[in-house]
Amino acid sequence: MTCPDPIMLHAWLDGELDAANAATVEAHIEKCPDCSGTAERMSALRETIAGPALRYAPPTGLRERIDHDLPDRQRPARQWPQRAGWAAGGAIAASLALVLATPRPSETANVGPQLVASHVRSLLADHLVDIRTSDRHVVKPWFNGKIDFSPPTPDLAADGFPLVGGRLDYVGGRVVPAIVYRRRLHTINLFVWPANGAAPATMSVDGYTVLHWRQGDLDYWAVSDVAADDLAQFRAAFERAR
């Protein structure tokens, strides 16, 4: 009996698996004492973390200090109700964080070298993926809650670019998803984030090709040591499958 990767157990507990994979994991757990015990321990840990004893109670006066520190134009016109105030304050804070975190056009001028550095680092540090699977139905939901948008993660094996998995990286002042593919013996890191003013382009940095394109409301940056023509084929396959 082959036990599933522990990541699959986490994804099953989080409700991130599609129906077919969830049924497979559940059937295995029923027959495997080791995986059953692991799932029970994971579930108990989740309940402990979600329990009230570990919840953070904000200090008295926090809302007033936030109101005071916000620019005048972003302060509410009237006093917030107690319960609605926290929701509004959270929405404002989240909006500000998103605006500040999204790379500006001026910040993307040197994004090519940053992406190549991240690509090389992922190969040298043996941290190519945080979740290793070719199942796009596992990779895509794995990013839920870790970033503020949902990147597409198609499996392009039929086009010669099999999906390897995904990880989180840090580029342009924000956390971004890196979706990893193979081209024969070569690795392709595909970085994704919400579209900004940077013009799509192809560049070469230290022997690596960086291909940037925009589709919908997302920017895509593919980085690899494969030939530029291979990356162009990868982009075409990705756009068809997206």
Image (cartoon, helix red, strand yellow):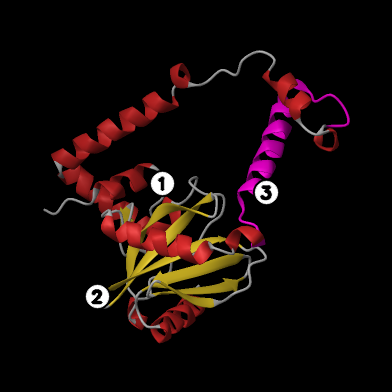
Left or right of 15? Residue 218 is right
Q: Please tell me whether the stretch drawn in magenta is mainly helix, strand or loop.
A: helix
Left or right of 49? Residue 194 is right
Q: Decide whether residue 217 is among the magenta residues.
A: no
35 or 154: which is nearer to us? 154
Report helix, strand or loop for mark 2.
loop
Q: Say if mark 2 contacts mark 3, CB within 8 Å.
A: no
Q: Name the residue: 17% across, 50% down.
A: 3
Q: Which numbered disc flags the more N-terminal residue, 2 or 3?
A: 3
Residue 102 locus on image (x, y percent):
62, 53
Residue 122 locus on image (x, y percent):
33, 58
Residue under label 1:
15
Left or right of 82? Residue 55 is left
Q: Amino acid at mark 1?
A: Gly
Residue under label 2:
185
Q: Quadrant of residue 227?
A: bottom left
Residue 103 locus on image (x, y percent):
61, 56
Q: Amino acid at mark 2?
A: Leu
Q: Is residue 7 above or below residue 91?
A: below
Disc on res. 99: 3
Left or right of 204? Residue 97 is right
Q: Which numbered disc flags the more N-terminal residue, 1 or 3?
A: 1
Whole-number angstrom distance, CA of label 2 to CA of label 1: 34 Å
